[in-house]
Amino acid sequence: MIVRGSEALLVQGITGKQGSFWTGKMQEYGTNVVGGVNPKKAGTQCCGVPVYASAVDAMNAGTHFDVSILFIPPLGVLAAARDAMAAGCKRIVCLTEHVPVRDVMFMMSEAKERGVQIVGPNTAGLVTPGECFVGFMPAFDSTIFKSGNVGVISRSGSLGTLMCLNIVQAGYGQSAFCGIGGDPIIGTTTRDALVALDNDEKTDAVVMVGEIGGSMEEEAAEYAATMKKPVVAAFIAGGSSPPGKKMGHAGAIVMGDKGTYQSKKQALEAAGVEVLATPSAIGAALGNTSVKLA
Amino acid sequence: MNFEEFAAKPLLAKAGIRVPGSAMAATVDEAGAAAEKLGDVMVKAQVPTGKRGKAGGIVRATSAAEAKAAAEKILGMEIGGYTVEKLLVEQCASIAAEYYAAILNDAASKGPLLMFSDQGGMDIEEIAQTQPDRLRQIPIDVRHGLSTDDAKALVAPLVDASQHDDLAELLVKLYQAYADNDAELLEINPLAVLDDNSLLALDCKFTLDDSAIKRQQELSLSGTPEKLTGRELAAQQLDLKYIDLEGSVGVLANGAGLTMTTMDVITHYGGSPANFLEIGGEAYTKATEALKLMIDNDKINSLVVNFCGAFARTDVMTEGVINAWQELKPDIPVFFSIHGTGSIEARQMLTDRLGMTAFETMDEAIQAAIQAAEAKS
């Protein structure tokens, strides 16, 4: 859940408009991109790295990679993830939104058997400020990301960005940003990210950004109560959203009394986590802790 | 996407699960004619919402005359905000017991979950609460599917041994229908056991995974489109997610999380959002269309434009807003907060072309917009 600058990255879908734009941004920031995939452009170069027909081909050509990122349209995601897994890749970051859930379930089943971690789908990615990033987050914007000691978890990319901005505006920095994704079924949950940050040396405290729908925040709250490090605060988006409507994210929907703002707020507060009324209140919440300014 | 009973049941029939003989009726006479043919019938309102029985939308009729009377009563009825325009007229059966069976996409197990209860006919939430020991469930590995043995093991503690084989066979077919149709949920409730011990699906709920519509085009034609307002429909045609709300502060933001948050923070500071509208993801290039769409709402007294760019470039979005603004010249005060990818260029553009300055924080922009909305109302 936390990427390191030493890890090698394969970009599946590197030659597309977004794939090449964000590969360039990742490289500029320090991410170690070792190759890309596009079956139609195998043998060429893109962003200064070789393009292969598949992840398996990349591996057979001797290109080692630790992480693969998918800039792949929804109906191609399952095949791309299988390719990465067949190549022995142990961590896949899936940015794509609107992947059919049935395909996601196939990915998850295969990943579980092979011991592969899938981040997403529908995640904005992972950032380790000052080191590297994998995804499409504005890691390079120093008003938003700064090396520090606060671990941030978010289902949403845009809202995660806002929270990181507020953390930096308050004078703090981040140890890691974990975008977990806005889909109803995702590979790495809020709770999984909490475990990773609890075990991360650089992280002194955690900030959670959740939203209505599902029960991930409730499950995370249970774990938060047992952590070595404080979960300083959480912001849960969607408190003012009407029930029964999908609020942009497929996972953000309140059904009956399931997935409500109240249920999440109660669970988090019972675990000792302050629930913020607005993301800008994070500065004051961090001010009450011993977390160092960046 | 939800499917009404009449559109869901054919999926069961196609998989080899028995459903009652039936006919559709849109008029009183059609209902009478259907009953003439089918004998004892249930006349059932077809609306995309639950609790039809409690609302009086399901009536038994033992003759054509009774069926006509039932149709007379049900057609035009309001159930859960929907007007009944069509009926499913279904042959009655002699029921000995009612079960519950469903398969859904389960976030906890990250795969399909099969649920079965011998207490059918009521809400699954109610069964889970009042008789949790009568509700059994197993996660299914999507790569292996559901085996007859697993299905048998699931039902065995709840039903008589004489029914194990038939039930297991039905559940395997149900799983096939769930898998073939990219279901989010496929539910039979009640699943009737008839006097001769055979099984009959009396009601069916099917939700198609919205993300699978692209590869289930033909199937999706039988689904019920979401009930949308004019603006919501127009937005859908542009591939934008827009929801009309009651308030006076218009919201244009990128990303689902940020847009919900903008609404929440407006509410927190005592204002009230007029809409949900996000142009995140691939839609970030559609700021011009989005602004044109939302601005045509009399309720809006002020507008917050809140961009926090990750994937969505704020320079591209801001340019789109400025273009629309210069074209339409709306008489509405607007307040910007712009951060993230492309924000330096975006802020500069805002100053150069509209002579406006973005606020340092989202909270300031929102508070200013609330004040302006109040001043105008």
Image (cartoon, rainbow, N blue to C red):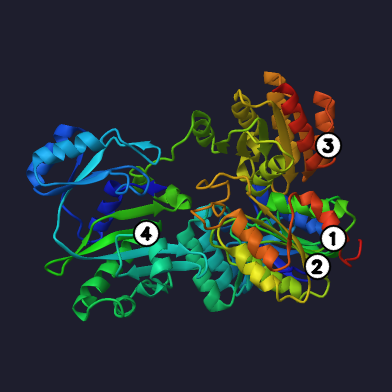
* Mark 2 lies on residue: A205
- Left or right: B104 as drawn, with respect to B316: left
Q: Indicate which disc, 4 or 3, sits on the residue closer to the N terminus.
A: 4
* Mark 4 lies on residue: B123
Label 4 or label 3, whichever lies nearer to me, is: 4
Amino acid type, mark 1: Leu
Q: Helix, strand, or loop for circle 1?
A: helix
CA distance for labels 2 and 1? 9 Å
Q: Helix, strand, or loop for circle 4?
A: loop
Bin the neighbour count of mark 3 within 10 Å (Cα to Cα): few under 14, some 14-19, many 20 and up: some
- Left or right: B18 as drawn, with respect to A230: left
Amino acid type, mark 2: Ala
Q: Helix, strand, or loop for circle 3?
A: loop
Whether residues under marks 3 and 2 lie with C-beta atoms below 8 angstroms apart, the answer is no
Instruction: Find residue B212 and report its horizontal and vertical position in percent.
Output: 45, 52
* Mark 3 lies on residue: B359
Which of B213 and B171 lies nearest the eye of the viewer?
Answer: B171
Do the residues marked 4 and 2 share a common chain?
no
Bin the neighbour count of mark 1 within 10 Å (Cα to Cα): few under 14, some 14-19, many 20 and up: many
CA distance for labels 3 and 2? 29 Å
Q: Helix, strand, or loop for circle 2?
A: strand
Quadrant of the drawing holding the N terminus of chain A? bottom right
Quadrant of the drawing holding the C terminus of chain A? bottom right
Marking on residue A286:
1
Whether residues under marks 2 and 1 lie with C-beta atoms below 8 angstroms apart, the answer is yes
A122 vs A247: above or below = below
Whether residues under marks 3 and 1 lie with C-beta atoms below 8 angstroms apart, the answer is no
Bin the neighbour count of mark 4 within 10 Å (Cα to Cα): few under 14, some 14-19, many 20 and up: some
